[in-house]
Image (cartoon, rainbow, N blue to C red):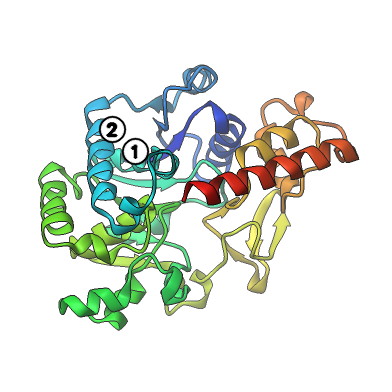
């Protein structure tokens, strides 16, 4: 078997989520599978000791690759119509370091799976590995169901260019929170070709917003390699939910299953919850997070004595302050647009 491993993107801000993810991988995927943590930024004071404490976990250190992906994304967003409409402060916020996850294409695993740090692994990856024998990209999400207005790519704009039909592109849409792929598919030469098309041929207009996930959709479409999505499988057992705040699951021995049919799921994704929500949860606050018990189980799997015995709701003053801060931040965002 060629080398097979897992990547995730993390820093100290998501430390609790990283620990929970690593524990879930150890229990539900394999205790021996190698995992590599790509630094989201330089805040790694808590991450580094955690990585060092695990024999199968390493920290990604190819900074040339990381910088190449940073530069690539910056060039794309500088040319994007939406990017040009934002002021400098707004651009700094939307152009974070999420594109660093794609440094995995320059890593050490021949085949690999990328998990968002705000996920928990729920089953082994055998079927992902098997699909990578035939396909170059493997996904398990429902992005292809989104309406045209919020889809990753502008389907009507792509049709205008005359190279793809909307019906041909739609089933290829996907997210970036969980995927399997192979080493070297998006190399330096490929990125240079993308820049030529995106900027000089204005294909940047195909991308429906300043998002690394949307850019990833462009790349997988343009490189024209075989792609598989389990949610489009003819086998109903393969089609499951994965979002904590949207899909119903059943907990059986600390493993979640799709409620309809008790189908195994690859992972639960805690999207739409902030890192601060999980910090407060781990400190004993009763935060409104779906399936928080399963998260706490994996977060404190190796430190059960540190798990909060009870969860307490914040007092009214604290709640009001947070609500006020949230509204102020929303106002600031609208002003900066």
| Residue 316 against residue 248 in the figure, above or below | above
Q: Residue at x 38, y 47 (%)?
A: 113
Q: Quadrant of residue 68?
A: top left
Secondary structure state at the residue bearing disc 1: helix
| Residue 132 against residue 317 in the figure, above or below | below
Q: Residue at x 34, y 43 (%)?
A: 99
Mark 1 vs 2: CB contact within 8 A: yes
Q: Which mark is residue 66?
A: 2
Q: Position of residue 311 (x, y in %)?
A: 85, 38
246 relative to 35 in the view: left or right: right
320 relative to 235 in the view: left or right: right
Secondary structure state at the residue bearing disc 2: helix
| Residue 229 against residue 71 in the figure, above or below | below
Q: Residues within 10 Å of mark 1 (few under 14, many from 20)?
A: many
Quadrant containing the N terminus is top left
Foreground: 196 or 112? 196
Q: Position of residue 263 (x, y in %)?
A: 59, 67
Q: Which mark is residue 100?
A: 1
């Amino acid at each position: 078997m060629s080398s097979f491993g897992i990547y995730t993107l993390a820093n100290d801000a998501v430390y609790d989520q990283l620990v929970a993810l690593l524990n879930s991988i150890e229990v539900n995927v394999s205790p021996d599978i190698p995992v590599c943590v790509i630094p989201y930024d330089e805040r790694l004071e808590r991450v580094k000791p955690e990585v060092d404490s695990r024999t199968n976990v390493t920290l990604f250190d190819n900074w040339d690759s990381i910088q190449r992906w940073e530069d690539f994304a910056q060039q794309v967003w500088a040319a994007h119509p939406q990017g040009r409409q934002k002021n400098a402060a707004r651009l700094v916020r939307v152009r974070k370091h999420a594109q660093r996850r794609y440094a995995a294409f320059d890593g050490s695993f021949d085949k690999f799976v990328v998990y968002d740090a705000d996920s928990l692994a729920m089953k082994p990856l055998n079927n992902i590995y098997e699909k990578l024998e035939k396909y170059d990209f493997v996904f398990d999400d429902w992005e292809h169901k989104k309406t045209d207005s919020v889809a990753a790519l502008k389907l009507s704009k792509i049709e205008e260019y005359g190279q793809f039909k909307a019906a041909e592109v739609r089933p290829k849409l996907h997210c970036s929170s969980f995927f399997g792929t192979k080493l070297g598919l998006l190399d330096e030469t490929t990125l240079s070709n993308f820049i030529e098309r995106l900027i000089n041929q204005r294909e940047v207009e195909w991308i429906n917003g300043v998002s690394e996930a949307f850019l990833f959709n462009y790349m997988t479409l343009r490189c024209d390699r075989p792609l598989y999505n389990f949610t489009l499988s003819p086998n109903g057992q393969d089609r499951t939910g994965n979002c904590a705040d949207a899909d119903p699951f059943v907990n059986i021995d600390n493993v979640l299953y799709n409620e309809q049919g008790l189908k195994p799921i690859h992972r639960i994704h805690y999207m739409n919850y902030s890192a601060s929500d999980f910090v407060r949860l781990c400190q004993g606050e009763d935060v409104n997070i779906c399936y928080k018990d399963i998260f706490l189980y994996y977060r404190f799997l190796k430190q059960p004595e540190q798990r909060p015995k009870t969860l307490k709701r914040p007092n009214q003053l604290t709640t009001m302050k947070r609500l006020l801060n949230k509204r102020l931040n929303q106002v600031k965002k609208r002003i900066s647009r």
